[in-house]
Image (cartoon, rainbow, N blue to C red):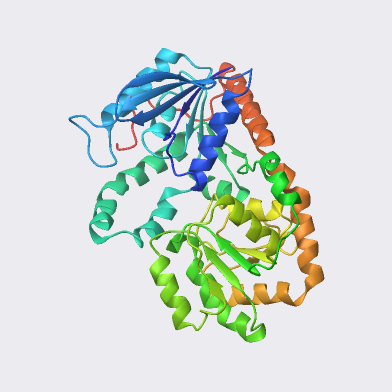
Amino acid sequence: MKVALLCEYSRDMGAYQGSNIYITELITRLAGRDDIDLHLITMGRENAVRQEEGFTHHILRKGGPLSLPYFHPLVLVRMVKTVRAIRPDIVHALSTRYPCSTAAVLLQNDYPSLVTAFGIFEREIAHYREDMPPLERTLSHIFHTFFIRNERWVLSRAPELVVDAPSIGDLVRTPTTGRIHVVAAGLDLERLRPQILSPPAGEGPDIVFINTLTRLKGADILLSALPGVVKAYPGIRACIGGKGPQAPELRRLARDLGLEANVIFPGFVPDEEKYRYYRQCRMVVVPSRWDCQPSPLFEAAAFGKPVVASDMAHPGIVEDGVTGLIFRSDDAAGLEEKILFLLDDDAARERMGRAAAARVGEYDWPRVVDRYVTIYQDAVREHRRGGKRATAPAGASPER
């Protein structure tokens, strides 16, 4: 099967951002299959076609006389032409962003088309703006309006849509008229297994948060929940690991709350150190205000640790009271209550960790890719039968 995969990708992508990990893993896994002829279409500084390990990489130059920040109309035209020249069996856009998703929807009358929604940009951008400098925030209001309109248009017309949790499917069910498939983010269990089997060495933090330090990820909510936890358990230790624009604010907040003796800020945490923290800790906290790709949910499960997650942090992966606990987003008091419950009840904490570990195989990358290939095959059959669930009028575009 010939697959045209449209996405933002480069070898130097940030390796620790959830969507980048997802894209890189999916490309690698698809390229390694004998039944997939993968053609990757991305944007870059120069036009090029490269034969890379297991796939053909078509790079389209950004910029040009009509280009504006975030908006490259000529790239969209070239992307559509490139796909037509490849003549794929299916077109797959990774994300609802312009221009990849736009091209996939415009091509759906000619080829089966699939869009993976990593998240809902319209929901996320309000949180991202809080971490932006003033000028960038102003530009965001101007140019991201187009991205939002494009996303709405794509969601309303994509014939096949992949989301990574049932809750995200519920959010897009009203605008979309296509079929919705739930495929959870992947985890490389084979690579993790030696780390999982290594015995804990020494003492580490009891509570672990490792993520990008932005308001979206909610580390400030965890800090606000800790004074009550420290009052009940004066020796408790928490790790807030990662880098990001909120880091100075978080350090000030910890100091103002009197948590300097209980909270460590190790900065960027390499994988080996991160896995050591997971082996040593009692729980992992994911307090995101909105998050569709929180890899700590899957990593914590792999290490047999319960997760305390907000109801905006990929709800549906954590089963409340079974594999972890859920609290209402932005509710520090609710988070404090859940943390104390797990600290008070060793048996419940260990039971939830075992239950999480028992389910983690569902998210192993080989299973994720098998699921994608099945969706590809179903979409091709549906398209050949003339059963497209949504059609974009000829020449229609999201800005109209």
Q: Where is residue 355 shown, x and y percent of the image?
A: 78, 56
Residue lying at the far front in this picture: please name it.
202
- Where is residue 374? Give x, y as percent: 66, 27
Give the image quarter of residue 99.
Answer: top left
Relative horizontal placement of residue 26, taking residue 303 as reference (left or right): left
Residue 177 appears in the picture as rendered:
no
Residue 6 found in image quarter: top left
Q: Please state if 160 lies on the left or on the right of 64 as rendered.
A: right
Point 71% across, 58% down: residue:
319
- Tell me, yes or no, if residue 393 can be seen here: yes
149 vs 224, nearest the viewer: 224
Q: Please give the name of the residue rendered at 68% of the width and 45% of the height, measured from the top-left corner.
A: 192
Instruction: Name the spot of residue 351 as percent of width and height, x first.
Output: 80, 63
Q: Is residue 342 above or below residue 105?
A: below
| Vertical comparison of 271 with 12: above or below | below
Quarter of the image holding residue 173?
Answer: top right
Q: Residue at x 65, y 81 (%)?
A: 235
Is residue 287 shown above or below 44?
below
> Could you tell me residue 89's position as x and y percent?
53, 17
